[in-house]
Amino acid sequence: MLEIRDLSAGVDGKEILKGLNLSVQAGEVHAIMGPNGSGKSTLAQVLAGRGEYAVTSGTVTFNGVSLLELKPEERARAGIFLAFQYPVEIPGVNSTVFLKAAFNECRKARGETELDAVEFLALVKKKTNLLELDPALLSRAVNEGFSGGEKKRNEIFQMAVLEPKLAILDETDSGLDIDALKIVSRGVNKLRRPDNATLVITHYQRLLNYIVPDHVHVLVHGRIVKSGGKELALELEQRGYDWILEGAAANGKP
Amino acid sequence: MMDTLTQTDREPATAPFLAGELGPGPAWLQSLREQARTRLGEIGFPTTEQEEWRFTNMAPLRQWPLHAAEAGARQVGPADIEPFRLAGNGYCLVFVDGRFRPELSTLPGPGAALRAGNLRAQWDGDGRELQPHLARYADEKANFFTALNTASFEDGAFVSVPAKAVVEQPVQLLYLAASERPGAAVHARNLIVAHQGSSVKIIETYASLTSAPHLTNAVTELALGLEARVEHCKLQNENERAFHIAAVQAAQSRNSHWLSHSIATGARLARNQIQTWLVEEGAEAILNGLYLARGEQLIDHHTVVDHAQPRCESHEFYYGIMAGRSHGVFNGKIFVRQDAQKTNAKQTNRNLVLSEQALINTKPQLEIFADDVKCTHGATVGQLNDEALFYLRSRGIGAGLARRMLIRAFANDAVERITLAPVRAQLEQLLTEWFESLDTSLSSHDR
């Protein structure tokens, strides 16, 4: 589904990703772990198409399409979804109006008919139940005045509505208490299907107790230095990142 | 209010706007007109050397061969008016090229809670209701165009709301420019008197049925009696070759409440003076504004809130969106006079600049002579938020629509402050059309 080959990218002339390789198949959950500043969020932003990040080399293929040539909205319509680490507050833009526009733009791109207001609200109701999200939030402006937990839940709620093929969860666990974490994880798990995939980006292993990954990758200094099964996350939890950093340094890769 | 006027570079002030003739009316009105004409000479045609006109160059207006708009220059029927009329059961006073058109208007009947008609009918009668108010509030000592209006106006609207009358139906004053002959000038004059404890909603609409350049020079005076409540909405969407100059002056008695909106999207050059004078204790004014400029437009708002007495409140919110090579001007003046203790005055001006060539000059001006007051002001100038734009696009919303959503969101507060649903509906449509016209110019920097 997703093939990243030798990807290098940076911002403001500073290279952050340095030849990253990753392959994700449909039906899989991959976790990307790594210390602060290793490039985890950069990877998420580059995949979503954030213009501030410049790709200097490499390719990203998504279901046979060259992803890097697409605009952010085209990537979303192709099935990429980024759950933001810091969801943006957008005063004056109503949550429901926003999501209906996004939903219908994606439907249109797939050649499907748009839903009218009544049909869309029925869908929304179903999905808010899944995330135990207060429907009142949806009558407010996008993320405006939401608590940290509400913002994160709202991200997964949007994901539930848009039903992406590849969901990228960027530090979705940060700022969540344990109850919210369970709700969000349950939501993500319910959305798993054989034909979609999830990329979970996290600093801590905690989230992976609830969203169990098939593969765990450790990102250090802009490249993946170690990959393994879910047990790798537990090892990182116990031993920290130092032993991997030392290993990476020993290999002459800063 | 402004006593120091440039003495230099004065030219014969009347020509070419007045053919030397004063507008019609009985002796008491003629004497007001004479005074105004004298003032015209004293003030002189505005130049950018005057602080009040620093950013707004009126010189192009002088180059025009202006003439008083002729009656019946074009046939105008109900179908022409329909697009501008507010939906619903409100009253509507229609003026075409400055002429009152009762047959196109919807007027209150004899049993109605208010009276609304044209000024001329009043001064052709005994004029008793006009005399205490007409030309008593508008600031013609300093403003050339206000003085010009007083000297010249031929007609306009008169709305009088008796004490305690609460009028639910809005009253629309619809001014349409129709003449195809370039340079038609209309000096429109309106007087709204809301007596003690009354409540009324007035909408002034200015639009063009013609694409020819024309001049509108409008003055509206509003007298609010004790505890009166008036919502006043001025919608200006004249053609892109028009000059639109307007002064709205309210005078507020004790505990009265004025909610003012100025929505300006039209004209090549638009200058709005929106002013209120808080004459007695406990009066409250809310000044809400939205200006949208594109192309080569210049839209200028000068507001004045004059706190003369204690315990009055004013809240001012003006929002501007500038695209293309347009130019916005906002100047917000707040006076707090010596007696006006416990004043609470707040002013906000926010501007969204959508292109590198667009320009905004914004200036708050606070003159405070009392010591126990609360006054705040703030002005911002910014562009669309890139992070918000990316967020919307990352959900599948195209760049053009995402931008429109954010621009619309910027204008949202100004729209929401309007309580009249038909006005909001009209405004929504106008905004939609405006945004669509921007699309081509914005799409160039999509990534």
Image (tube, coloured by chain):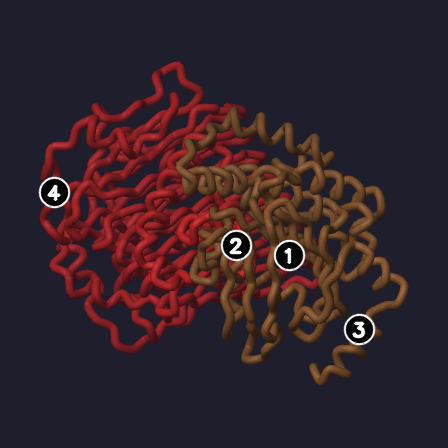
Chain colours: A brown, B red
Measure how far apart labels 2 and 4 are at the Cα level: 36 Å
Q: Chain of mark 4?
A: B
Measure how far apart labels 4 and 1 are at the Cα level: 48 Å
> Closer to the camera: disc 4 or disc 1?
4
Callout 4–callout 1 Cβ contact below 8 Å: no
Residue neighbourhood size for the residue with mark 3, other residues' Cα within 10 Å, grouped as few (<14), some (14–19), many (≥20): some
> Closer to the camera: disc 3 or disc 1?
3
Figure quadrant of the C terminus of chain B: bottom left
Residue B112: x, y in percent? Answer: 40, 18
Q: Secondary structure at mark 4?
A: loop
Q: Secondary structure at mark 3?
A: helix
On the question of residue B288 being in view, the answer is: no
Amino acid carrying mark 2 in the image: Val
Measure how far apart labels 3 and 1 are at the Cα level: 74 Å
The image's mark for residue B339 is 1
Q: Earlier in the sequence, mark 4 or mark 1?
A: 4
Q: In the visual, does A240 lie left or right of B272?
A: right
Q: Secondary structure at mark 1?
A: loop
> Closer to the camera: disc 4 or disc 3?
3
Q: Earlier in the sequence, mark 2 or mark 1?
A: 2
Residue occupying image coordinates x 63% and y 39%: A193
Q: Chain of mark 1?
A: B
The image's mark for residue B70 is 4
